[in-house]
Image (spheres, grey):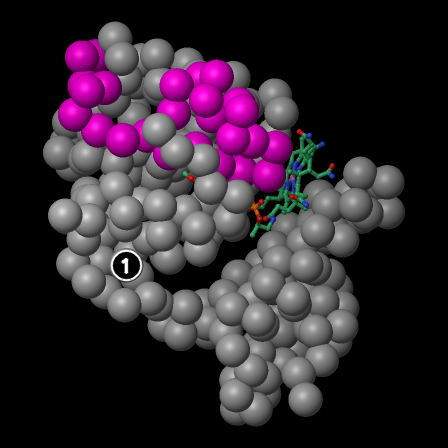
Amino acid sequence: MFDPQKLMEATIAGDSGTVEQLVRTALERNTPADEILNSGLVAAMDIVGERMENEDMFIPEVLMAAQAMDAGVQILKPLLADDASNAKGKAIIGTVKGDLHDIGKNLVAMMMASTGLEVHNLGVDIPPEEFVAQIKAKNANLVCLSALLTTTMPMMKETIDAIIESGLRDNLKIMVGGAPVTQSYADRIGADGFAPDAGSAAKMAKAFFAS
Ligand code: B1M
């Protein structure tokens, strides 16, 4: 039987080898990929966050835990794919300026791509003008902004304002997300959508372009 506790412990300890082994074993035992992701890997990062806050874990250890989580995600990646139904969206996704968190944003990108959307992952620390330039370069009709820090949430609004000023706003949808982001914040800054997790973000993106 899948033991999420062991997977959480290995992830928190930054033990990528054990994480890979536990994920493979869980899959061999027919544990659904999303259960392994949510009850093992994502749950571990919540504990890492608490320990970070209490100064029981420091940046190098947090980074190792993040790498261990990514090692597990890489194995799950093909299995988390939804039905690729050739949605018509062309999305760009990035973490806003000043923010270096990318694990959740990468999960969102992966899940969106799995629905058939064309997804361009711009990376982290992306300034508003770069989002605008990439909308033009990629001819994007969906812009996805991620922020994990309360201090970088206002950069989402600045990015949306830059998109409005560029005259591109009417031709695209804007989605926002990240741990501190809420539906009411999304409404306040003029986003078209907010999703609390990667699965619902992908569903929402797909729904935007369903004909
Ligand atoms: Co940072 N960090 N961190 N950190 N870090 C948090 C966010 C924090 C909550 C930890 C804590 O203190 N409890 C805290 C923020 C507090 C706040 O602002 N309220 C914090 C802090 C303070 C910091 C630093 C300032 C620490 C310091 O230097 N003193 C610093 C800032 C650096 C910077 O960005 N400028 C920092 C640095 C780091 C690391 C680099 C060490 C590392 C990031 C590594 C990386 O991403 N490659 C890190 C990590 C790992 C975390 C925690 C522990 C885990 C984040 C994570 O990956 N979660 C985090 C604590 C926590 O969140 N519990 C924390 C797992 C991931 C799957 O979830 O990212 O929430 P999440 O994504 C979800 C949803 O939010 C959603 O879907 C995803 C998947 O389901 N989602 C979207 C995300 N984007 C979306 C976009 C959408 C829709 C949904 O639409 C477009």
Badge 1 is on which residue?
A: 115
The residue at the point 48 percent across, 17 percent down is 188
Residue 143 position within the rendered picture, expressed as x and y whole percent measured from the top left: 30, 33
Q: Is residue 6 above or below residue 181?
A: below
At label 1, counting other C-alpha atoms closer than 10 Å, the crowd grade (few under 14, some 14-19, many 20 or more) is: many
Magenta residue check for 33: no
Q: Which residues are magenta?
A: 166-191
Q: Quadrant of residue 4?
A: bottom right
Residue 56 position within the rendered picture, expressed as x and y whole percent measured from the top left: 86, 47
Please identify the quadrant where the N terminus is shown.
Answer: bottom right
Camera sees residue 84: yes
The residue at the point 27 percent across, 17 percent down is 163
Camera sees residue 64: no
Residue 114 position within the rendered picture, expressed as x and y whole percent measured from the top left: 30, 61
Kindly tell me whether mark 1's CB lies below 8 Å from ligand 1.
no
How many numbered marks are there? 1
The residue at the point 39 percent across, 19 percent down is 190
> In the displayed structure, does residue 100 sit left or right of residue 167?
right
Q: Which quarter is ligand 1 in? A: top right
Residue 10 position within the rendered picture, expressed as x and y whole percent measured from the top left: 71, 70
The residue at the point 76 percent across, 53 percent down is 47
Q: Is residue 192 above or below residue 48?
A: above
Q: Which secondary structure lies at badge 1?
A: loop
Q: In the rendered structure, which amino acid carries the disc numbered 1? A: Thr
Q: Is residue 72 above or below residue 164?
A: below
Magenta residue check for 176: yes
